[in-house]
Image (cartoon, helix red, strand yellow):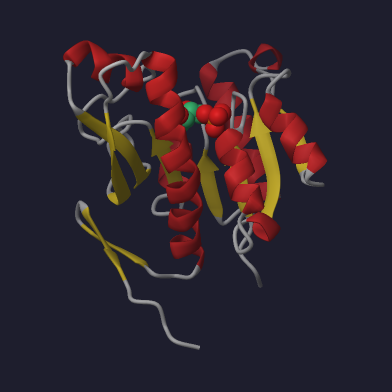
Amino acid sequence: MEARVAVLASGSGTNLQALLDDEVVGPRIALVVSDRGGAGALDRAAAAGVKPLHLDPADHGSREAYDDALLDLLKTERVDLVCLAGFMRILSPDIVRFFEGRMLNVHPSLLPAFPGARAPRDALAWGVRVTGVTVHLVDEEVDHGPIVLQEAVTVEEDDDEASLHARIKRVEHRLYPRAARLWLEGRLRVEGRRVRIAAEVPR
Ligand code: GRF
């Protein structure tokens, strides 16, 4: 059976789009879940013929109740791989543990530098000359799990947060589908904090 992928997104969904557009990853995306009703990601899912689901925190009394509903949904949909693509909620340990080794996140910095929700702004404020993109497996700490792929992005003299984040996103759109494909091809092996990538098997 082909693996089923869920993408969780809160925002415009440009990373979701990159995943949808990938010829290996796209056809395996079974559903897109957002905590925000107006998220562009839900429109992108619908446009691609993928089930868009708004799971509204207002309908669930607590963070635990929300996460229970989310985990139930992902189980019901028999999801194998979860891709976080700008999902602005911290997930409960239950969900993270259930999907151990099966949940990816894309982050706009070279982790462990600049974790958190404002990485491009923080990189500019620090004055670094180089930042970048990290795709990592999700563990119970935020922006922390074993790193699958990274790529550097140079900070230009005249960058502001918007211009830097836009350049970072262009790299994300290339790196994230590649990492998801590696997972789907069974080529990732986790050894402690290191992720080993097996060579492509020639067809
Ligand atoms: C990306 O920069 C991603 O790294 C971060 O959230 C942003 C989502 O952007 N986690 P988009 O909604 O995919 O355009």
Q: Residue furthest front?
A: 158
Q: Is residue 145 above or below residue 163?
A: below
Q: Give me the residue at 19% from left, 55% from top.
A: 192
Residue nearer the viewer, 66 or 175: 175
Residue nearer the viewer, 176 or 156: 156
Where residue 6 sits in the image (x, y, percent)? 62, 46
Q: Give me the residue at 39% from left, 54% from top.
A: 101
For the question of whether residue 190 can be seen, the reply is yes
Where residue 41 sits in the image (x, y, percent)? 67, 31
Question: Which corner quadrant holds the N terminus?
Answer: bottom right
Indicate left or right for 188 with 89 as reference.
Answer: left
Q: Give me the residue at 73% from left, 36% from top.
A: 44
Q: In this view, does 167 lie above or below 161?
A: below
Indicate left or right for 108 with 2 as reference.
Answer: left
Q: In this view, does 80 lie above or below 87?
A: below
Q: How many marks are shown on the rendered structure? A: 0
Which quarter of the picture shows residue 15? top right
Q: Residue furthest bottom?
A: 203
For the question of whether residue 53 can be seen, the reply is no
Q: In this view, does 154 lie above or below 64?
A: below
Where residue 198 sits in the image (x, y, percent)? 32, 73
Indicate left or right for 184 with 76 as reference.
Answer: left
Q: Give me the residue at 72% from left, 18% from top.
A: 38
Which quarter of the picture shows residue 47? top right
